[in-house]
Amino acid sequence: MTDRTSALAGAVQGEPLTFRRLVAAIGGWLGIVESVVPPLLFVVLYQIAAIGDAPAAVPRAALLPIVVVPLACSALLLVYRALRRQRVAAAVAGAVVVAVSALLVLVTGDASSNYVPGFFINGAYGLAFLVSLLVRWPLVGVAAGLLLQQGDWRADARRRRLCAWLTVAWVALFGVRLAVELPLFFAGHQVVALGIARIALGVPLYALVLVITVLGVQAAFPRRAAVSPSAG
């Protein structure tokens, strides 16, 4: 069980949802840095280049350092995790997304392409949560049932309804991201605004929905005896 999953499992089992536990469930301080710093570097470097080249567009050659610096940052954070012998799966996935985004920018010559992978990721997650609602197996309930080893959660109508509403909250999270970012993308020349929106709707919104989910699951699932580490 990963540190993030352990923290989330402890929270939903009824342990106090402290700020420290919330940070751990999000991915720890290092996970927050991995989520925020690379896109922030991209926005800052692009804005500097845009000011320098105004009123002309940022040339393709100037885009190279703009995408390489965030990519190098992701790589360094990944190496740091590996040296500390931490789990690197999430960091690898994040670095891959940064690399794909960088490649798209260099191939298209359009800095807005940096945000395209995020659209597909949010769309895929949102669709998965939505489909789980349509088939009446809300993902929040599935995850809570697995974490708490309560496979009978669907037998309680109140629990099913609450898990469904919590799943709706996750559908809304991904939907809000797309609803805000896609118009900016199609408006064109909104690279900085897109970057700010991506950061603002990233960790902060995720943390908010996570808190709501944990509190909802705590209310829906009665606390049972602690699960032994070997069972997790």
Image (cartoon, rainbow, N blue to C red):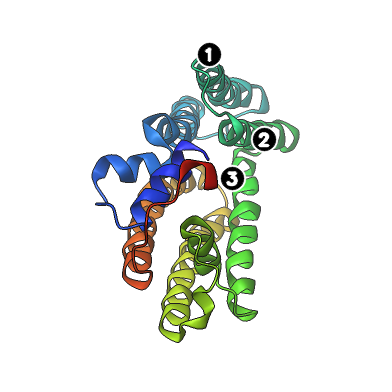
Left or right of residue 56, residue 10 in this image:
left
Residue that badge 1 annotates: 83
Q: Residue at x 63, y 37 (%)?
A: 97
Residue that badge 3 annotates: 115
Numbered disc 1: secondary structure: helix
- Kind of residue indicated by mark 1: Leu
Q: Is residue 107 above or below residue 223?
A: above
Instruction: For the residues labelled 3 and 2, say whether their Cβ atoms are less than 8 Å apart.
Output: no
Name the front one of labels 3 and 1.
1
Q: Nearer the viewer, residue 156 or 67?
A: 156
- The local crowd at label 2, few if under 14, some if 14 to 19, many if 20 or more residues have their Cα within 10 Å, is many
Numbered disc 2: secondary structure: helix
Instruction: For the residues labelled 3 and 1, say whether their Cβ atoms are less than 8 Å apart.
Output: no
- Kind of residue indicated by mark 2: Val
Which circle's residue, 3 or 1, is located before the other in the chain?
Answer: 1
Instruction: For the residues labelled 1 and 2, say whether their Cβ atoms are less than 8 Å apart.
Output: no
Q: Nearer the viewer, residue 202 or 45?
A: 202
Residue that badge 2 annotates: 105
Q: In which quarter of the image is residue 109?
A: top right
Which circle's residue, 3 or 2, is located before the other in the chain?
Answer: 2
Q: Residue at x 48, y 48 (%)?
A: 194
